[in-house]
Image (cartoon, rainbow, N blue to C red):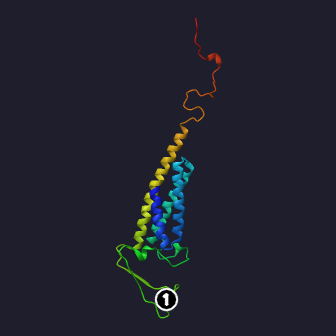
Amino acid sequence: MVGGSVLALERQVFDFLGYQWAPILANFFHIIAVILGLFGTIQYRPRYIVAYTVWAALWVAWNVFIICFYLDVGGLSKDSDLLTFNISAHHSWWSEHGPGCVRGEMPQAAGGRTTESHSYITVMGCFMDYQYIEVLHSAAQILVALLGFVYGCYVVSAITEEEDSFDFIGGFEPFPLYHVNEKPSHLLLRPVCP
């Protein structure tokens, strides 16, 4: 669970840098779910762990969607503004700042540059295309989420098994104090004294 949180924080930083609003929200909810799962594990609260486990399954589905988005599977396109909620024209931070990428801006036409002007940016020499970096991020998230899912299921079963095996009122006594004797008294064995 902790590994998932660290990976989510790393991913959150790069999504903020790229103004990817949908992944930012998803990462935020993921971090909250991981915190709840950790709290549930430490405090022996199976409901919180079940909530994390359900979220882990949704997180796998979200990351499969991200992989399909960046690989242009189906009707999805990495060039759309879907992940920014059509608010801005920003794309993945990795598209301009990937490993080995050389970024160059084309000079602006006469009229000067303002804070609101946009310039054409060229990116060359990348060792790996940005969509594959995003796919690798999502694949790592899926792997960690699947491990968290299995761990969550195991912990929930261990906690509930432990709760079922202990009698809180009478302890482990073979005949607790509240035991009701169902046999009539004349059938009970009594010592015979001569």
Q: Is residue 76 visible?
A: no
Q: Label 1 crowding class (10 Å Cα cut-off): few <14, some 14-19, many 20+?
A: few
Q: Identify whether 45 is placed above or below 16.
A: above
Q: Residue at x 50, y 62 (%)?
A: 61
Q: Amino acid at mark 1?
A: Arg
Q: Is residue 169 visible?
A: yes
- Residue that lies at the very extreme toward the top in this rendered image: 194
- Residue 101, given in percent of the width and then of the height, sits at 37, 77
Q: Identify whether 189 is placed above or below 167.
A: above
Q: Residue at x 64, y 26 (%)?
A: 180
- Residue 6, given in percent of the width and then of the height, sits at 45, 61
Closer to us: 154 or 167: 167
- Residue 64, given in percent of the width and then of the height, sits at 47, 64
Q: Residue at x 48, y 53 (%)?
A: 149
Q: Identify whether 95 is placed above or below 9.
A: below
Which residue carries the number 1 mark?
113
Judged from the image, the secondary structure of the residue bearing numbered disc 1 is loop
- Residue 70, given in percent of the width and then of the height, sits at 45, 71
**Quadrant of the image containing the C terminus:** top right
Number of marks in picture: 1
Q: Residue at x 53, y 69 (%)?
A: 22
- Residue that lies at the very extreme toward the bottom in this rendered image: 110
Give the quadrant of residue 86: bottom right
